Image (cartoon, coloured by chain):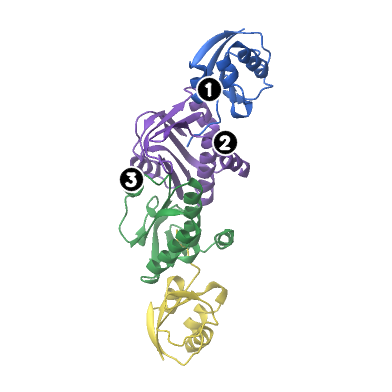
Chain colours: A blue, B yellow, C green, D purple
Amino acid sequence: MNLEILYFAWLRERIGHPKESVETDAETVGALIRELRAREDRYALAFSDLDAVRVAVDQELCDLDTPLEGAREVAFFPPMTGG
Amino acid sequence: MNLEILYFAWLRERIGHPKESVETDAETVGALIRELRAREDRYALAFSDLDAVRVAVDQELCDLDTPLEGAREVAFFPPMTGG
Amino acid sequence: MHIRVQQNAFDYGEECARFAAGRTDTGAVVTFCGIVRAPENAVLYRMEIEHYPGMTERALAQIAQSAIQRWDLHDCLIIHRYGPLTAGAQIMMVATASRHRADAFAAADFLMDYLKSRAPFWKKEITDQGTNWVAAKDTDEAALKRW
Amino acid sequence: MHIRVQQNAFDYGEECARFAAGRTDTGAVVTFCGIVRAPENAVLYRMEIEHYPGMTERALAQIAQSAIQRWDLHDCLIIHRYGPLTAGAQIMMVATASRHRADAFAAADFLMDYLKSRAPFWKKEITDQGTNWVAAKDTDEAALKRW
């Protein structure tokens, strides 16, 4: 499965780019994060505290257990601060 | 004691004028209302349901027990509907 | 604190713009505008707003002062009209400015609750069904207990 | 329902005026304007607002839709800016219109609570003390439990 992965705010800064395409068999958001963490230190650092990370799959907020089947876009970002 | 008495909204309409000067020895708002009621039917009618009447003495909301000593202006009106 | 009681129309947009302009400590501005609504099942020819000159300004200033004491407000505005108005006319507005949004919201809500039941205004509706004084609602009096 | 996500400034006064105009069923309009505030004890050079194009519009529409389902609203407006802003700049606004004031107030307050914590915006402050991402506040998350 090919996923478009987006990063925002300090996750984007720590990882060093705003988006990338990833080929993965991860079944859930949590499994995808484990794969990303294993890649390089900057990923491990960005995902070191999951309490500070929010996830959207295809632009809908979701959590670590959310399945990725059929997903096209996964975004990682810190808690939102609109308004 | 000479008091300026003001009437607003339907109290003004029932009594027929917006203000009048009254010479009175009434010690409280309640006593003043009893004097006014005794004057004429239109006063008795206007003050027939005191739950529907509000009072201000010298432009401050007050109640039937409020003493009139030193007062110059007493206003009677229905519950307010601002906003 | 700005209090205005007037017969003339006010410009809601311009008042909002002026109230919000030039602020750097303020994070939040809340405004409320009250509009003359036609009563249900009747055609409103006009609404006449009567008030108690002198006491009105005093009551509004007291209500604004209470809000300033209770919340951390940078500024507070109340404009209220009297005289004859037609449906759709803007009767009154309030505006509040504060550091954080909770204060601005609570203060504006508080001002409206007190204006409804403690400011000496009375509304008469002249409709195709006749003429009547708008009655105070129990829910408006009850709303004061929130504060 | 009107949702706008834009880099350009908006005219708060003009938006308020337009939103409130021409209404006869509406008795109450509430507006909120959010303003860039300098952080305490620092000089703000600028604030940069990042967002998630696509998801932002979708999230705002969902939040507005929830408000419309919960309260008796005649209309609802959300404008939110992104990009670089300086202190005093107007970041965003919401407006609500309803028959009675309670709905307009509650809906505007609700929209703000959800915008704060559920719309994909992030704020970076560039000050004389350094650069930092504004952290979400526990009180903002807790505010959602009110609804």
- Judging by the rendered image, the residue that carries numbered circle 3 is C21
What numbered label is drawn on residue D66? 2
| Quadrant location, the C terminus of chain D | top right
Residue D142 located left or right of residue B71 = right
Q: Picture coordinates of residue D20 (x, y %)?
A: 39, 44
- Write down the chain letter for disc 1: A
Circle 3: is it few (<14), some (14-19), or many (20+) Cα within 10 Å? some
Q: Picture coordinates of residue D21 (x, y %)?
A: 37, 44
Kindly state the secondary structure of the residue where label 2 is placed.
Answer: helix
| Cα–Cα gap, marks 1 and 2 | 29 Å
- Which amino acid does the dot numbered 1 rest on? Leu
State the image quarter where residue B20 is shown: bottom left
- Which amino acid does the dot numbered 2 rest on? Ser
- Write down the chain letter for disc 3: C
Which circle, 3 or 1, is nearer the viewer?
1
Q: Is residue D105 above or below residue D80?
A: below
- Which amino acid does the dot numbered 3 rest on? Ala
| Image marks 2 and 3: residues in contact by CB distance under 8 Å | no
Kindly state the secondary structure of the residue where label 1 is placed.
Answer: helix
What numbered label is drawn on residue A11? 1
| Cα–Cα gap, marks 3 and 1 | 35 Å
